Image (cartoon, grey):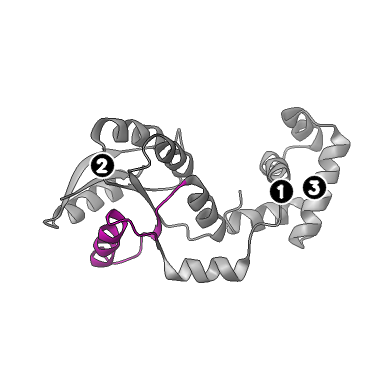
Amino acid sequence: MIRLAIAEDQTLVRDALAKLLARFADFVVVGEAADGAEAVELVERCRPDVVLMDIEMPRLDGLEACRRIAARHPEVRVAILTTFGRPGYLQQALEAGAAAFLLKDDPVDRLAGNIRRIAAGERVIDPSLAVLTLATGPCPLTPRELEVLRAAADGSPVAEVARRLNLSEGSVRNYLSVIIQKLGVTNRIQAVRKAEANGWI
């Protein structure tokens, strides 16, 4: 019997997943969580074999929840299950210790088969996303550049970004200039859009 936990902030999606997977004789859903923080607590209590984890959730996102679970309970296999098939998310998920990266539009029978493979110790990645990731390549920005771009993503003035990051305004301008050049765009709005589209921020 494979013990499953589901972390998904949309109640209808979470309930539907639980009901669909409970139909399989070799699965038992031992718990459900509405955000990443609940998912971490759920793993502590229920010790599932596999956690199906959404990425974009309140309080604690799925990637950080995955990182914490992998650090505390490496025997628990976390499968990222998301609508957002972005190359950067795949890379971040693997770095966080995820055992799988799957898309929500898969048929339930295929999902069930992938869960069995994950529980058996395999790493499972959606093939279309793997191809897209290879075609896109790694993120060209350094961690510090990503930090600056995240801080600037809401359109804040350079002075405000500098204050948040404890940098000089000149340093922020230099970082943004390098970011724009690396991403092959003409302004920071386009840089943010490209980084978000690829799952880098």
Q: CA distance from mark 3 to mark 2?
A: 43 Å
Q: Residue at x 46, y 40 (%)?
A: 67
Q: Magenta span covers which residues?
A: 97-123
Q: CA distance from mark 3 to mark 1?
A: 12 Å
Say whether disc 3 or disc 2 marks the residue closer to the N-terminus: 2
Q: Residues within 10 Å of mark 2 (few under 14, many from 20)?
A: many
Secondary structure of residue under mark 3: helix
Residue 69 image point, x, y percent:
40, 38
Q: CA distance from mark 2 to mark 1?
A: 35 Å
Q: Residue at x 51, y 71 (%)?
A: 131
Secondary structure of residue under mark 2: loop
Q: Quadrant of residue 65?
A: top left
Q: Residue at x 34, y 38 (%)?
A: 34
Residue 66 image point, x, y percent:
43, 42
Circle 2: residue type: Pro
- Decide if residue 66 is on the left or right side of residue 16: right
- Decide if residue 195 is on the left or right side of residue 64: right
Res. 48 mark: 2
Residue 94 image point, x, y percent:
49, 52
Res. 142 mark: 1
